[in-house]
Image (spheres, helix red, strand yellow):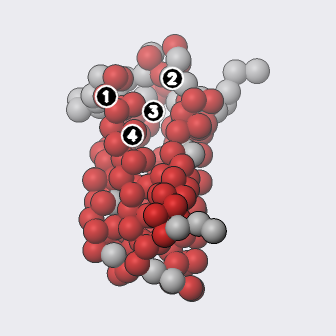
Amino acid sequence: MTTDRQEKAKQLLGCTGLAFLPALGAVVAQPGPWYQALKKPPLQPPSWVFGPVWMALYLMMGLAHYAFVRESTGEKRRRGTLFQVGQLALNAAWSPLFFGLKRPGLAMADLVLLMMAARKTQREFGKASPVAGKLLLPYLAWLCFAAYLNGGICWLNRKRNVVAELPAR
């Protein structure tokens, strides 16, 4: 028989573990020489910034999901969790699209869908738990910044036809 404390620990571990799954996409598709050669927008941070920022954001997404799960039940919990899983899937797709396939235009389309899905998730979570909704605000802000970076790369490299560049065969 599990105690309430054990149940909470399992939920916390499950919610945070789920939130970190998109990091696997970044492990599979790493920036390389192709990315280094691209022109970057003026506010491009150094590459070392991305890892710590994403780790903090994944942790906050996991904690937000946990807070949401603790405050919701039934259909509301199921719907919110589906939104979370959907936006995490879009998040996981971005690195393979951008770095793996070298398709920043396609990655930008994914990012627009991701922003919409993350906003919907944030609203659903916030209805059940104001804390959960607030925990997703830095993620939404970072996605806006990511759209600036992704869009800037598409724009600055448009003459190289990087938006439609096919992967090397």
Q: Amino acid at mark 4?
A: Trp
Nearest to N terminus: mark 3 or mark 2: 2
Q: Amino acid at mark 3?
A: Arg
Badge 3 element: helix
* Whole-percent x, y for residue 97 in the image: 59, 39
Q: Please tell me whether mark 2 or mark 4 is closer to you in this view.
A: 4
* Amino acid type assigned to the residue bearing label 2 in the image: Pro
Which of the numbered marks, if any, corresponds to residue 54? 4
Q: Residue at x 63, y 68 (%)?
A: 1
Q: Camera-side residue: 46 or 123?
A: 123
* Image quadrant assignment for residue 156: top left
Label 1 or label 2, whichever comes before in sequence order: 2
Instruction: Please name which of the two marks, 3 or 2, marks the residue nearer to the observer.
Output: 2
Query: Quick one: label 3 or label 1, which is nearer the N terminus?
Result: 1
Pick whichever of labels 3 and 4 is earlier in the sequence.
Answer: 4
Q: Which residue is mark 2?
A: 31
CA separation, marks 3 and 2? 19 Å
Marks 1/2: CA distance? 14 Å
Rendering coords of residue 48 (x, y %): 34, 22
* SS assignment at label 4: helix
Residue 98: x and y, percent? 54, 35
Residue 32 can be seen in this image: yes
Looking at the image, tell me whether mark 2 or mark 4 is earlier in sequence order: 2
Report, in whole angstroms, how far the alpha carbon at label 1 lies from the one at label 4: 9 Å
* Disc number for residue 158: 3
145 up-or-down from 158: above or below: below
